[in-house]
Amino acid sequence: MRAVARLTLMLLAASSFAAAQSTDIRGIYLYTNDVSQITAGTTNALTTSLNVTGVDGIAIVVGWDAIEPSMGQFQWALLDQWIHTAISGGKKIDLAVPAGDSTPPWLFQPAPVGAGATPLNFTVSPHAGSTGVCQSETIAAPWDSAFLGQWDAMLGALSAHLKSAGTYNAITLVRITGINRTTEELRLPAETAASTGLACVSNSLQTWQAAGYRPSLLLQGWNAVVGSFTKSFPDKTFVVSIIPNDAFPGINESGLLITG
Amino acid sequence: MIGDEDEPLLMSAAQQLPGRLVVQFDFLMPGELPSVVVTNAAQNYGTLAAFQTNEYLGNGGAACSEPVTNPTPCTAATFLTMLETGIYPLGHDSTLRSQYIEVFHANATAFPASAQQAHLELTCDYQLSLGGQAFAYAGGTGTITITTGANCPWSVGTLPSWITLTSPSSGVGPGTVTYQVAPSSMIVSASDLSGSFTIGDQSFTVEQEGGCCSSVIGWMPHLAAGGGWTTTFTVVNKSSTAGVANTSFFAPGGASLALPLLVPQQPSIAGAVLASTIDQPIPANGLLVLEATGASTGAYSEGSALLGGKGTDLDGFAIFHYGPTQQEAVVPMGSLSTLGPGNPPYVVAFDNTNGVLTGVAVENTNATASFPVIIRDDQGNILRTTSISLPTFGHTSFVLSTMFPQTANIRGTVEFDNPPGDPVFQIAALGIRYTGGTTTTIPALPKLGKPAGSMAHLAAGNGWQTTFVLVNQGTGASNITLNFYDDNGSPLSLPLTFPQGGAPVTTPSLNQSIAPGASLWVQVADGDTLETGSAQLSATSNVGGFAIFRYNPNGQEAVVPLENRGAGAYLIAYDNTANTATGIALANASGAPANIPVTLRDEAGNLLGTSSIALNGNGHSSFILSGLFPQSATNRGAVEFDAPAGGTISVLGIRSPPALTFTTLPALAK
């Protein structure tokens, strides 16, 4: 029975893969920060780089707060502009809409203007404090039902817009985001003042413990996020960005800190 | 290791998105391995690995390594090194080859030539006309055709010392590489050589036979490759010493025949190896599989094969396969070891009635000669005497009734003799029976028949039908007794009919007289109830024979040789890959109960399991091998059945591919 199940799985994998492989994902993709945050100089540099021979595509990163500044109100102009730039250059598109520090403030406001998610406040430092920079952000827990509902709705609206704009088929890859810290990488705030050596960094572990963090809840939220992506982009190939270490708070299933 | 913290999330996503998830992470530092999690996701769910080739530092720009407080500056060289690392994360292991790379935009501008090169390496596909080529000790020249995009660069990697490139070592776009292999006498070692080199991202393997010491073991009188045909050679090492198998192929005119060969047990050889002779190591108690495919032109080739070996006890067989109909037939190996010394002619019994056709293949295993041919009808009357001339290692195949019209619409035998006075075992022959689109081997009977033997399987009823064919190879009439036994060893009464004439009879024991040179055909009628068991023959003079069991619903047939070798053990080489099953029939040809030891080994000769099968006196058992040994499912190997002390057994293997085009697997005497 196990062999049969495995065979079925392999067949399923093969058939899904064949469908997704109708678009050739291979190539060199340019990367830069959230296009809603970059300077005019960076925009020009990125555009110039896109014309370098050998560059096949671009990772268009645009924050959630940039495309949905108010709940249910979408601003597609910037995204459409970059998509058209890529299309006109014959480039492939890897689309990433991160949450994390791009989470829109309305998510935490009460109805009717907001979704009423529970805010979790952190002060983090990129590169484990080695840059000396501190940065505050407010995010929702990955299992927060208000967050998951709005995330699902945003992805549905994004997919519908791309289809109505005729650019859906130009999207080669979709980045699975939603559980983020300061980039589109799959991670959560997990540092402390002690771990970074920066007094400005808040105790992320304490915040998560207070919020009831459990690895199983993280997985539950992740599966909901993945489900939303597959619902809105059923025929796309996805990317998930992972990082080497300390991607998640060291808290076990009992809510206790993992030591050693 | 990187990424292990993400394991539950990554594996969950990989399961939900089989084949369409790219895992992206930072570039690998020298010596750093990707996570086992990433590797497993790639292998189990078709997840791709992708790599970010630089560390983005926000307003600080990009660096080429961490820590960010002391990064390695990006240069064209470091950039390209990282791209190479990203492209081949596991040391050029294509299973995790990254096809997607993310670079910080400033790097693309700073190093456009490197970006272009990386683009080509990512997106260029390279295909070689062959995966390798094998040469005899005399060496030779080889040609490799490269298929790739017009702008795709390629170069030839480092060559083994005994290979010389005779064309440019690099190029752009489709091209050709030629090389020369030196004679092995010109190099230090006379042992077999094997080496490989790369072209683009593909590997090409060259093998060369050493200059001495291979001895002839046996002949396979027919092979077919191309035009939909493939022939798979299975060589079994019956000894506990590792050795080398040498397989050589010959065209009908006797010249060496170069064939593209697949070596499925060596995944490192990606494509076919072109060879007219090939040496391959064969482990102790293990087996070797070679598949002769068609030429790249798709043209049909046929001929014969010679099996040699070095320092071990080898045996084997071939199966030729026709893709469009999935039909298969086995080619047993003719050998001195199985037939004993002497100069035995071969006899092929045929039945060309009711639209059945008989194909015959003959190989000359020695110097040019003319072989006498005697055609008899089923009463032993000589219809024609003639001869066939074949050059050294020459081969011919033909439809019997086309070559010899007097064989049309009758039953009889065709005997292939050695040249008069020739003391050397020289001819090998094979019969093929074509019935309504199905193909079955008819074993060529060496004219060394014995007055007794057993057949490991019979099946009659519920769609099954068995036909016994016995040929009197003596000079006088032979009185034969054919006894049938059920699985428990009790006499099995069967309804018999006689296609050559005679009243039907139901009996557990058939007594008949067969004239010299004549053949007897006895058919067990299909009935409502399936009966299985075995048969035992005794005769007053030398008789050879076989049985054909047939499944009437699809017309598929397989042959059951008459076992009279009296070996102490028999091996069945099995191949349960590609959803193929192996059936086994085992009969106790002695009157006393027996406990028959069974030993299962994999293709590398490793012991997988042992068991024993208890049979009553004259008892019989038939089963699927993977039922007795689940560890044999999905792999290759050999299963050994040992005869009990003082006892005699007979064994039959049946290969059953998914298309149910079953084929006999010959039992190899040990």
Image (tube, rainbow, N blue to C red):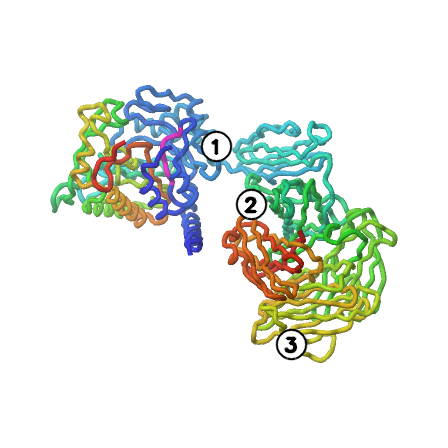
Residue A105's spot in the image, x, y percent?
16, 38
| Residue situated furthest bottom in the rendering | B503
Label 3 crowd (10 A; few <14 / some 14-19 / many >=20): some
Q: Residue at x 71, y 37 (%)?
A: B136
Which amino acid type is shown beneath numbered disc 1? Gly
Displayed quadrant of residue A196 = top left
User: Would residue A18 be found to the left or right of residue B440 on screen?
Assistant: left
| Distance in Å between CA atoms under marks 2 and 1 | 29 Å
Q: Is residue B26 above or below residue B215?
A: above
What secondary structure do most residues of the magenta stretch adopt?
A: strand
Which numbered mark, 2 or 1, is in the foreground of this view?
2
Badge 1: chain ID: B
User: Would residue B68 be found to the left or right of residue B209 on screen?
Assistant: left
Q: Secondary structure at mark 1?
A: loop
Find disc 1 in the rendering and name its residue.
B91
Which amino acid type is shown beneath numbered disc 3? Pro
Q: Nearer the viewer, residue B9 or B158?
A: B9
Q: Is residue B10 above or below residue B553?
A: above
Answer with mark 3 or mark 1, whichever residue precedes in sequence. 1
Q: Which mark is residue B364?
A: none
Which amino acid type is shown beneath numbered disc 2? Asn
